[in-house]
Amino acid sequence: MAFEENAKNVEETGLNHKLLLKEDLDFHQFELGNMKNDTEFIAKELFEIASEQRLNILFHLLEKKYTVSNMAKELEATVPEVYRNFERLVKAGFIEKDVDGKYFLTTSGQTVCVQIPSLIFTSKFEKYFKNHTYGNIPTKFIQRIGSLDSGQHIVGVVKVLEQWKEVYKNAENYIYNILSEVPYTKDVIEELVAKMEKDVKVKSIFSETAIIPKERKEIFEKINFKKFIDKEIIQRRMMKKVDAVVILNEKEACLMLPSSKGDIDISEMIFSKDPEFHEWCLDFFKDCWEKSSLFQERKLK
């Protein structure tokens, strides 16, 4: 009876997972259709901000209101030049002038400023994206990719594992993992066990194709891993394939994306302590946790 109930739970979880994936696909197709219909409008909007000075004006107005003369002084530019760009931005609907003669951002202007960090992020990591992709990360997270622009690019397996271990070491409340490979090096395991001994909660999502070292079983028995599972200090879930590797505690996070070949590349990572970066990674983890299925040991090879 217990076996049948468990099998039913697995089946229901799998069905929910498929429904969520279908929702993501439908949303992506809907958004793509809308963008194709709006290309003329988008091209016009991009043309209006295709100027270093106009972009600087928008970013300065994001902080506070400015008169033309104050902005010209701030940008070390001539008043007529700045005035012309103010007028273009007013005509485009990005800024307006109040009764005191000071300019401020409209809702459209604020939206542009919020979206530009996405371009900054891809520009900042241009070299990284020559051989990495977003893979199948849901569109709703790619639309927020500018939140990652504070990230630090870490290169090399040794440096990546060091930073990975630091995230474990600095954890006080929780450690969340999305894993395509499991690094069972002695120092990483010791750090993880030390945190679990202090009741730091660990949640991990494993890819069904995760690379697992042969010595895994021996290590588990040595540290009495089962006691952490029984106490629910550690919780595990599975996905058929993970779209990105994420490692985070309550204040810092790491992200590893697929290479151009489609496999997650753990020889390079993007790391940050910035709250927006952390929020993106946490939301992504929660989304994957919701879509994941019950952990099944037999699926790990």
Image (cartoon, helix red, strand yellow):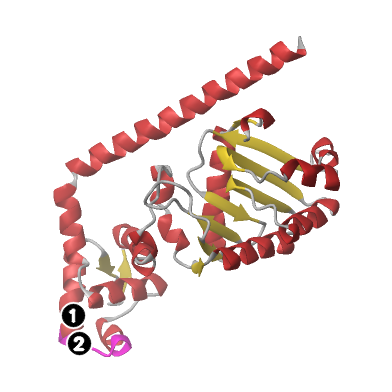
Is residue 110 covered in magenta?
no
The reply, left or right, for residue 33 in relation to residue 275 is left
> Identity of the amino acid at label 2?
Val
What kind of element bears circle 1? helix
Q: Which mark is residue 83?
A: 1
- Looking at the picture, which amino acid does disc 1 mark? Tyr
Question: How far across and how far down the image is residue 135, in percent?
Answer: 40, 46
- The magenta stretch is 73-80
Res 297 quadrant in image: top right
The residue labelled by disc 2 is: 79
Q: Residue at x 16, y 56 (%)?
A: 43
Q: x, y percentage for residue 167? A: 66, 61
Mark 1–mark 2 contact, CB under 8 Å?
yes
Q: Quadrant of the N terminus?
A: top right
Q: Helix or strand or loop: what does disc 2 sit on?
A: helix
Q: Residue furthest top?
A: 1
Instruction: Give coordinates of residue 74: x percent, y percent.
Output: 32, 87
